[in-house]
Amino acid sequence: VQQYQEAAAELLVICNNDKYFSSDCNEKLGLVERKFLNRDGLPQRKWFRHILQAPGLFLGYSADAFPGIQQALDSNNLTQALEQIQIAAMQIQSASNFLSFEELKNATLK
C-alpha cells in the first residue's frame, strides 16, 4: 500500500507540473481502477471482481473493504484469508506499477 501511495503522489506531482505528460496522466488516472479487478472474482461470488470494495456477503448492498479478506475472516477461514491477502497485495502492486512513470521518464531521457 505504501508503494501505491508513493506512486500516486509521484503521479500527482508529475501531472501538476509537466504538461508533456498530461495525456499519459489522464490515461493512468482513468484506467488504474481496472488494476483492482481480479479476473477470478471473489470466493463464492465470481461476478464481483473488485478487490478493494464490493457488497458484503451478508450486508445486502452495504460495502465491505477488501471483501475477499473480510469474507474469509468472517467465515473463520484463515487459509482463504491468506490467499485473499496475497491476491490483494498482487493487485495493489499491479496498480502501483501502472501508476509509475519510470518507463516514460527513461524513454524521454534517451
Image (tube, rainbow, N blue to C red):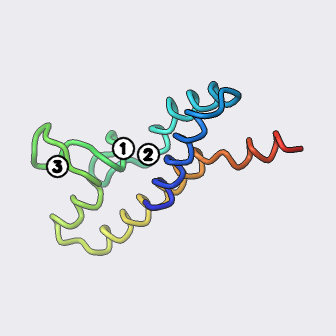
Q: Pick out the residue farthest to the front.
A: 17
Residue 77 percent location from the top left of the image: 23, 71
Looking at the rendering, in which quadrant would you find the N terminus? Answer: bottom left
Whichever of labels 1 and 3 marks the residue nearer the N terminus, that label is 1
Mark 3 surroundings: few (<14), some (14-19) or many (≥20) residues within 10 A: some
Q: Mark 3 belongs to which amino acid?
A: Leu
Q: Residue at x 15, y 64 (%)?
A: 74
Whole-percent x, y for residue 56 in the image: 17, 47
Q: Residue at x 37, y 65 (%)?
A: 85
Q: Nearer the viewer, mark 2 or mark 3?
A: 2
x then y, percent, for residue 47:
33, 39
How far, Cα to Cα, is label 2 from label 3? 19 Å
Q: Which residue is mark 1?
A: 50
Q: Which residue is mark 2?
A: 36
- Residue bearing mark 3: 57
Q: Give the vertical position of 68 relative to 75 (above or below).
A: above
Tell me how far mark 2 sits from mark 1, CA to CA.
6 Å
Q: Position of residue 62 (x, y in %)?
A: 13, 41
Which tag, 2 or 1, sits closer to the chain's start? 2
Figure disc tally: 3
Task: Compare marks 2 and 3 and give the one earlier in the sequence.
Answer: 2
Q: Are marks 2 and 1 in contact (CB under 8 Å)?
A: yes
- Between 38 and 20, the one lying in front of the other is 20
**In which quadrant will I find the C terminus?**
top right
Front residue (pair 21, 16) = 16
> Mark 1 Cα within 10 Å, few/some/many (few <14, many 20+)?
many
Q: Amino acid at mark 2?
A: Phe
For numbered disc 2, what is the local secondary structure?
Answer: helix
